[in-house]
Image (cartoon, rainbow, N blue to C red):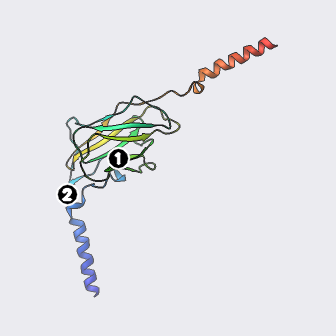
């Protein structure tokens, strides 16, 4: 009986070690891809590299965001099966903000914080996705959306970038000039009342 269990355990280990079907990311990007955004795809045990040609995909966003508010982000182009999308401060590798209301066949994942990135939930065909991003409530200055998009497991593009999205100016009360003007008016009123 013990010999049968040992043989079964050895068989399971060998099958798991040599089974080539486990190298896709059909259920979404792994958290190990959060910084590099490299999917780590394998094709018959060999690492697949990103395409060096111009990407047929683009990220479409507005030119401004308001802290704490939502912004629509689109991945447009031909049909694709997988992706990883983040909002980042330009030149940085950590995502900022959160994603919500994932469309069909997509899901939010935790990289630095809950729901900080979006990815595919399966390999069903996707095209022209519209995703909802919520900016951090305190604002972080300019942000840029960065994506890796996989047309197929062996055909993907990395470092697809949106234009930089500027943080919208706050209310007039948040501007230092406003406080200087009010202070000058109060000082003048005080001098006049003396």
Q: Quadrant of residue 56?
A: top left
The image's mark for residue 114 is none
Q: Is residue 27 above or below residue 10?
A: above
* Residue at 27% across, 81% down: 6
Residue for badge 1: 103
Residue for badge 2: 45
The residue tagged with tag 2: helix, strand or loop?
Answer: loop
* Residue 83 vs residue 10, the one in the foreground: 83
Within-10-Å neighbours for mark 2: few <14, some 14–19, many 20+ = few
Q: Quadrant of the C terminus?
A: top right
Residue farthest to the left, as pictured:
44
The percent coordinates of residue 48 (x first, y second) are 21, 49
Number of residue marks: 2
The residue tagged with tag 1: helix, strand or loop?
Answer: loop
* Residue 57 vs residue 7, the one in the foreground: 57
Residue farthest to the top, as pictured:
192
* Residue 18 vs residue 81, the one in the foreground: 81
Residue farthest to the right, as pictured:
194
* Residue at 25% across, 84% down: 4
Q: Quadrant of residue 10?
A: bottom left
Q: Tell whether 185 sits left or right of 74.
A: right
Q: Tell whether 92 sits left or right of 177.
A: left
Q: Is residue 153 above or below residue 67?
A: below
The answer to whether mark 2 and mark 1 are in CB contact below 8 A is no
Numbered disc in front, either 2 or 1: 1
The percent coordinates of residue 144 (x first, y second) are 38, 35
């Amino acid at each position: 009986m013990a010999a049968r269990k040992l043989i079964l355990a050895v068989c399971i280990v060998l099958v798991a070690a040599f089974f080539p079907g486990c190298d896709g990311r059909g259920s979404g990007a792994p958290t190990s891809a959060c910084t590099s955004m490299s999917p780590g795809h394998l094709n018959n045990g060999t690492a697949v590299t990103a395409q060096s040609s111009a990407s047929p995909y683009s990220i479409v966003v507005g030119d401004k965001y308001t802290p704490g508010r939502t912004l629509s982000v689109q991945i447009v182009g031909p049909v694709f099966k997988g992706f990883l999308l983040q909002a980042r401060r330009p030149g940085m590798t950590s995502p900022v903000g959160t994603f919500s209301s994932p469309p069909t066949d997509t899901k939010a994942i935790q990289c630095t914080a809950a729901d900080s990135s979006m990815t595919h939930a399966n390999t069903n065909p996707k095209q022209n996705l519209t995703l909802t991003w919520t900016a951090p409530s305190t604002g972080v200055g300019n942000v840029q959306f960065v994506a890796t998009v996989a047309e197929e497991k062996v055909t993907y593009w990395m470092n697809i970038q949106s234009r930089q999205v500027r943080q919208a100016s706050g209310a007039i009360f948040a501007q230092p000039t406003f406080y200087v003007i009010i202070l000058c008016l109060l000082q003048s009123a005080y001098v006049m009342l003396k």
